[in-house]
Amino acid sequence: MMKAKLLEASSRRLRGTGGASTLALAAVGWITWHRRRGSSWNGFKGCWELNCRLGRLETAEADKNSGVARAPGVTLLRGDTCIRTGIWRGCLGYPCTMENFLLGAFKPACNIVITFSDAKTRKQVPMKKENGQTVTVPLFRSQENIAGKISIEPLQGKKIEHNGVKVELLGQIEMYFDRGNFYDFTSLVRELDVPGEIYERKTYPFEFSTVEMPYETYSGVNVRLRYVLKVTVSRNYGGSIVEYQDFMVHNFSPLPSINNSIKMEVGIEDCLHIEFEYNKSKYHLKDVIIGKIYFLLVRIKIKNMDLEIRRRESTGSGANTHVETETLAKYELMDGAPVRGESIPIRLFLSPYELTPTHRNINNKFSVKYYLNLVLVDEEDRRYFKQQEITMYRLQDS
């Protein structure tokens, strides 16, 4: 009778521990089940003895309010801290950590490894992930073959019952304001296995031939475009097992047949009149911007003049369009007051900066444009600027 009251009191106390109560009540039921099967009560004296790293044990003293006394050698759980980690001793005859039990319940039933057939020879490039970490991934271009093998190995002593194995090649766009929802613009599927069971390591070859990948990989302020291989082991219970492998895509453009220079005159009436000239309007990512600034009229005191490279990222459409502008480079052209007739040369190398090609209305989701922004500051810190769009493209490495 006292044992039944003790279990009842333990259960009642654990119901007040929040999220840990369900697990604790399950443990009480587990002990009760063994008692009904005729197990000795003494075998359970140590079941509730836990070594906690995150919290301390609190021995159940005599509950004066309820009149229930503590059984010798039995330790009641204190809150959720003792549930999270500890050691059950006694009834099972060997240590069993609750932490390992919980981790094992959510651990995948197998290890999946994706390797590319030309991984040793293919160029690897750094790619920044969502969490800020930089990883190295293989580099591809449009119309290339993407082939390799997928290895699935069950954990030791386990088998995998599945409804089929498949690999998908996906091109996806994700808006950060709608995180988790991907817009697929490329989707190819290869079925690797029919429903069955996997008892030991199994390897599946795969190949996607002349894959059309029209857009470059891009990671911006509010949007990212990525390519990924997705392996799915479909199951009825426990959820499907999914593994991802990112890769990067660069698309190259030839030298433009027409590349006009940029020449403009700007100014403030009767105060400032300048003429600027850039040698061309289209630049590859490792190009050099060459130009000149001519001062035709100067009646205000100019303190300094800078040339900026700006990237403007537009996402959404219509009233939901969101624009984000970044200043990627700032180059000082002049420090001091110019005079009429003075000419300032421009020579700005683009290779040190993290530039991408210009993207125009990619899948009706986003655009990326680049601008040269000429900024003049007078002695009263008033700013005068003129912005000119340029086109960026990726040239094949020689």
Image (tube, rainbow, N blue to C red):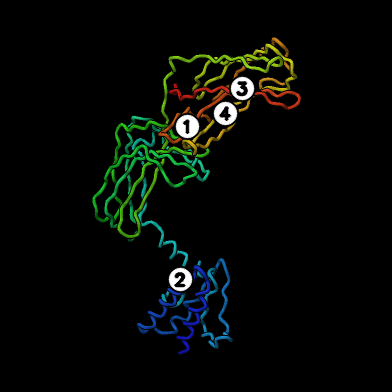
- Mark 2, other Cα within 10 Å: few <14 / some 14–19 / many ≥20: few
Dot in front, 3 or 4? 3
Q: Quadrant of the C terminus?
A: top left
Dot in front, 2 or 4? 4
Residue visible at 44% across and 47% down in the picture: 180
Q: Which mark is residue 386?
A: 3
**Where residue 74 sits in the image (x, y, percent)?**
51, 81
Q: Are marks 2 and 1 in contact (CB under 8 Å)?
A: no
Q: Earlier in the sequence, mark 2 or mark 3?
A: 2
Dot in front, 1 or 4? 1
Residue visible at 43% across and 23% down in the picture: 396
Q: Earlier in the sequence, mark 2 or mark 1?
A: 2
- Tag 3: residue type? Lys
Q: Are marks 2 and 3 in contact (CB under 8 Å)?
A: no
At mark 4, the secondary structure is: strand
Q: Which residue is mark 2?
A: 22
Question: In the figure, 285 relative to 48: above or below?
Answer: above
Question: In the figure, 246 relative to 385: above or below?
Answer: below
Q: Which residue is mark 4?
A: 310
Disc 1/disc 4 C-alpha distance (Å): 14 Å
Disc 2/disc 3 C-alpha distance (Å): 66 Å
Q: Which mark is residue 367?
A: 1
Q: Earlier in the sequence, mark 3 or mark 1?
A: 1
- Tag 2: residue type? Thr
- Mark 3, other Cα within 10 Å: few <14 / some 14–19 / many ≥20: some
